[in-house]
Image (tube, rainbow, N blue to C red):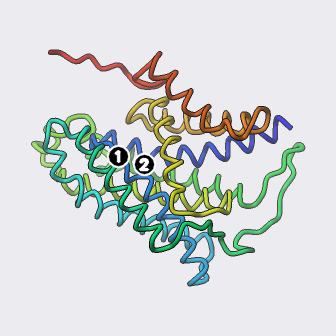
Amino acid sequence: MLAQQLVNGVLLGATYALFALGFTLMFGVLRVINLTYGFYFSAGAFLSLALTRQLGLGIWAALPLAAIGAGIMAVGIDWLLLTRLRRRATAELDSLMVTLGGVLALYSAMTAWLGPDIRRLPPGLVSADSFVIAGVRITTAQILILGATLLLVALLLALMRGTRLGLAIRAMAEKPDAAGLMGINTARASALVSFISGCLGGAGGVLIGLNFNAIHPYMGETMMLRGFVVIIVGGLGDIRGALIAGVALGVIEVLTAGYISSGLKEAVAFAILVAVLWTRPQGLFGRAVMRRA
């Protein structure tokens, strides 16, 4: 029983980590708190629903297309709402307020267009077969979710660590003004970061929709709490921390639901968030930054 719960928790946590990676990348590089990120999660799930139901595509085709569609939305919304705010000294607070209004408007528009009802992916989209290994049952859908998550994380790390583009993005994260002086096209790099973050958020929406087979407009809203927990526990802007914290949160939630009560999952996530902010505000893997007056 415990082994099964741990496996379920790791698989769920891998999706949380994927979602939080885009969130922490966006904050770490662009220095803005973009609350519209949860909308990309919902948008990715609905795009996959349309691609599979209306066009009859398989999940392996729908997943990248839905992720790319969410990434394109992210670039457009970022340009519309946040471009001017980045030049201000109070960009973080301003972005929080602007994107709060933006995401409420986006959720309302999506609900008015698509309705509030829960949608289901087409039956038979993924094989119902399962495998039993050492007494632990793993479904085909779970294998697909884990495989897709590992592939996307590997591609992101390869981009960030092994390409000139990744070097430019990391330079922007450290010293944005100096990066511009060194010839880096910061506007293009910012748009690329928004696109990558939107793709990761959209892919997370597809995988969560596949895992629970429940898609609705506000599904990104509940995921944002988990995203905040993961990036704060892992350390703002820390990719390694987001991966570890995401998997840990998934395991804790599954164990809480299995051994205590499913209604306490959100409470546990919030309690972890508060505890880390009280005891180690920079996160478990983040570094404290000394500010001089």
275 vs 172: above or below: above
Secondary structure category for the residue under label 2: helix
Question: Who is closer to the viewer here, 218 or 187?
Answer: 218
Which quadrant holds residue 5? top right
Residue 121, horizontal then vertical, whole percent: 65, 71
273 relative position to 33: left or right: right
Look at the numbered discs 2 and 1 and tell me whether their residues touch, using CB distance below 8 Å: yes
Q: Quadrant of the N terminus?
A: top right
Task: Give residue 26's mark.
Answer: 1
190 relative position to 105: left or right: left
Task: Give residue 107's mark.
Answer: none
Residue 248, horizontal then vertical, whole percent: 62, 33
Q: Residue at x 79, y 33 (%)?
A: 259
- The residue identified by callout 2 is 22
Question: Who is closer to the viewer here, 162 or 98?
Answer: 98
Residue 263, horizontal then vertical, whole percent: 69, 40
Which quadrant holds residue 268? top right
Task: Report the Cα–Cα distance between label 2 and label 1.
Answer: 6 Å
Q: Residue at x 28, y 64 (%)?
A: 76
60 vs 258: above or below: below
Secondary structure category for the residue under label 1: helix
The amino acid type found where label 1 is placed reads Met
Q: Residue at x 77, y 69 (%)?
A: 127
Residue 208, horizontal then vertical, whole percent: 61, 56
57 vs 157: above or below: below
Which quadrant holds residue 271? top right
Question: Who is closer to the viewer here, 291 or 91?
Answer: 91
